Image (cartoon, rainbow, N blue to C red):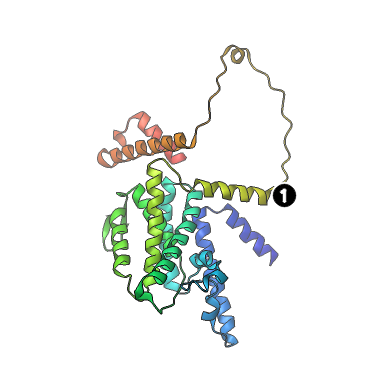
């Protein structure tokens, strides 16, 4: 058993964030079903147990199950529900990773889920339509919607091929998706559709700030880095190699020394934005005239961007 756990830990540590999120969702799905089967053998209602990992709509219950604000976004009870969600997460997460980082994906996943839960709770406790109604919510849909809309606002004209439909731009997929949610706010799954909208709002806010040169997820990424550093520090022993004495060549002694000031956050994101815009122009040129129409410098830039 220990060997299996160690092997699983090895794969998770080496897996990209997108795969890791999918692994966690699938593992939670399998674990929940196994526990439910065992409980049913003892005539215990499995739905009652699930209420401890799903987020409740009642504010009186929520303070006693505050962890459900995080657990619900990894919980799926229906096979088709998790299959559809993981397909969306893989498709849009793969595109997302081309324009943002792995850290952005994990943090936006969580914040999108929290935003979805917040709008879900707001709708159930504010609108008269839900008076006297109670609900429980689970699923990664709100988190995925944040990724979908962050990707769409970054590259709205990015095209993907859909079965039976053909080539479609991301902006049209996002538009149809949000319209369905808006028209379904009074359906049987009304709370879920409100959560989708909440996740989409978080994705839009992140992408709009990013396009203006501001990374609103940076404080969360720094916090995660500190937590990981503190957690790993006692377990890792680093043996520093002895440094060889530094000697400068005659040419280096003659050359003037230059000291470059490190970039500020705003300068970094401005530079990244300029580089991304240049790559977008090169890709548009490839679509219109083909790869052979690129200059040597443009080919080199495209190669460097792909390598990074």
The x, y position of residue 198, in whole percent, is 40, 61
Res 215 → quadrant: top left
Q: Residue at x 55, y 67 (%)?
A: 66
Q: Residue at x 34, y 75 (%)?
A: 129
**In the rendered view, does 87 fall on the left or right side of 157?**
right
**In the rendered view, does 194 fall on the left or right side of 235?**
left
Total count of labels: 1
The crowding category of the residue bearing disc 1, from other C-alpha atoms within 10 Å (few below 14, some 14 to 19, many at least 20), is few
Res 209 → quadrant: top left
The x, y position of residue 97, in whole percent, is 44, 49
Nearer to me, 282 or 204: 204
Query: Which part of the image, by quadrant, shows the N terminus?
Result: bottom right
Q: Residue at x 41, y 46 (%)?
A: 99
**In the rendered view, does 244 fall on the left or right side of 71?**
right
Residue, disc 1: 234
Nearer to me, 290 or 297: 297
């Amino acid at each position: 058993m220990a060997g299996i756990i160690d092997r699983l830990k090895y794969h998770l540590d080496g897996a990209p964030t997108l795969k890791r999120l999918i692994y966690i969702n699938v593992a939670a799905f399998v674990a929940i079903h196994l526990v439910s089967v065992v409980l049913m053998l003892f005539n215990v209602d499995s739905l009652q147990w699930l209420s401890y990992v799903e987020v409740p709509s009642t504010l009186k219950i929520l303070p006693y199950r505050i962890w459900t604000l995080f657990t619900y976004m990894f919980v799926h009870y229906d096979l088709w529900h998790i299959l559809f969600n993981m397909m969306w997460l893989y498709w849009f997460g793969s595109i997302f990773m081309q324009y943002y980082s792995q850290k952005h994906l994990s943090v936006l996943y969580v914040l999108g889920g929290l935003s979805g839960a917040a709008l879900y709770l707001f709708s159930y406790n504010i609108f008269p339509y839900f008076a006297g109604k109670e609900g429980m919510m689970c699923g990664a849909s709100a988190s995925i919607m944040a990724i979908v809309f962050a990707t769409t606002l970054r590259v709205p004209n990015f095209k993907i091929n859909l079965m039976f439909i053909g080539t479609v731009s991301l902006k049209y997929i996002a538009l149809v998706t949000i319209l369905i949610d808006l028209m379904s706010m009074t359906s049987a799954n009304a709370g879920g559709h409100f959560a989708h909208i909440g996740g989409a709002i978080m994705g839009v806010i992140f992408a709009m700030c990013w396009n203006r040169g501001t990374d609103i997820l940076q404080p969360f990424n720094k916090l995660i880095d500190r937590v990981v550093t503190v957690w790993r520090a006692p377990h890792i022993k680093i043996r520093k190699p002895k440094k060889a004495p530094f000697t400068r060549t005659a040419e280096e002694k003659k050359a003037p020394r230059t000291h470059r000031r490190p970039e500020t956050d705003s300068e970094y994101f401005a530079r990244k934005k300029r580089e991304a815009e240049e790559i977008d122009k090169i890709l548009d040129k490839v679509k219109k005239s083909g790869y052979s129409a690129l200059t040597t410098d443009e080919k080199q830039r495209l190669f460097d961007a792909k390598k990074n």
